[in-house]
């Protein structure tokens, strides 16, 4: 399922002419049950700004994403809100305990 979700997100973002796709994730055995791609910030798109943001978060035992924080971004502060909002919409399969320190990188590119 993980591969299917990544392929779907990449295809959808490519069709829109720009990309904000998950590029790298820390390995976790938790299956994603809901994924939301971040929206490309309009101001960044208008100015032709590309970059990335890496977020770190915890997955609660019931599969809810919590404690989201941006740990690295370039340019700083441009994509933070978009990736935070998207990650907060993700969900994972339940487990007996929380999974802490999960990281996800999102690359933002205008294509072309």
Image (tube, rainbow, N blue to C red):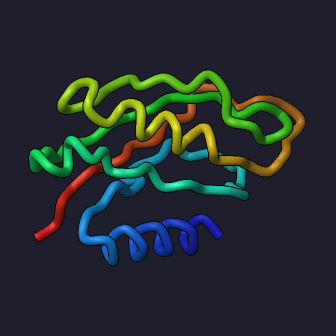
Does residue 53 sit above or below 13 in this rendering? above
In the image, 41 versus 73, the foreground residue is 41
Residue at 70%, 34% in the rendered image: 59
Residue 11 percent across, percent down from the top left: 40, 76
In the rendered image, which quarter is residue 110 located in? bottom left
Say left or right for 26 vs 75: right
Residue 55 percent across, percent down from the top left: 45, 32
Residue 17 percent across, percent down from the top left: 25, 71
In the rendered image, which quarter is residue 72 located in? top left
In the rendered image, which quarter is residue 65 located in? top right
Residue at 29%, 50% in the rendered image: 107
> Number of marks in the image?
0
Image quadrant holding the C terminus, namely bottom left
Does residue 8 sit above or below 65 in this rendering? below
Image quadrant holding the N terminus, namely bottom right
Residue at 27%, 47% in the rendered image: 42
Say left or right for 101 vs 1: left
Say left or right for 60 vs 6: right
Does residue 8 sit above or below 32 in this rendering? below
Residue 28 percent across, percent down from the top left: 63, 45
């Amino acid at each position: 399922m993980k591969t299917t979700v990544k392929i779907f997100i990449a295809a959808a973002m490519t069709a829109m002419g720009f990309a904000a796709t998950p590029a790298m994730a820390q390995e976790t055995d938790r299956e994603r049950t809901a994924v939301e791609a971040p929206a490309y910030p309009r101001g960044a798109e208008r100015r032709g700004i590309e970059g990335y943001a890496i977020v770190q978060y915890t997955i609660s035992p019931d599969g809810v994403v919590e404690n989201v924080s941006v740990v690295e971004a370039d340019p700083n502060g441009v994509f933070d809100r978009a990736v935070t909002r998207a990650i907060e919409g993700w969900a994972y399969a339940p487990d007996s305990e929380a999974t802490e320190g999960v990281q996800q990188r999102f690359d933002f590119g205008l294509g072309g």
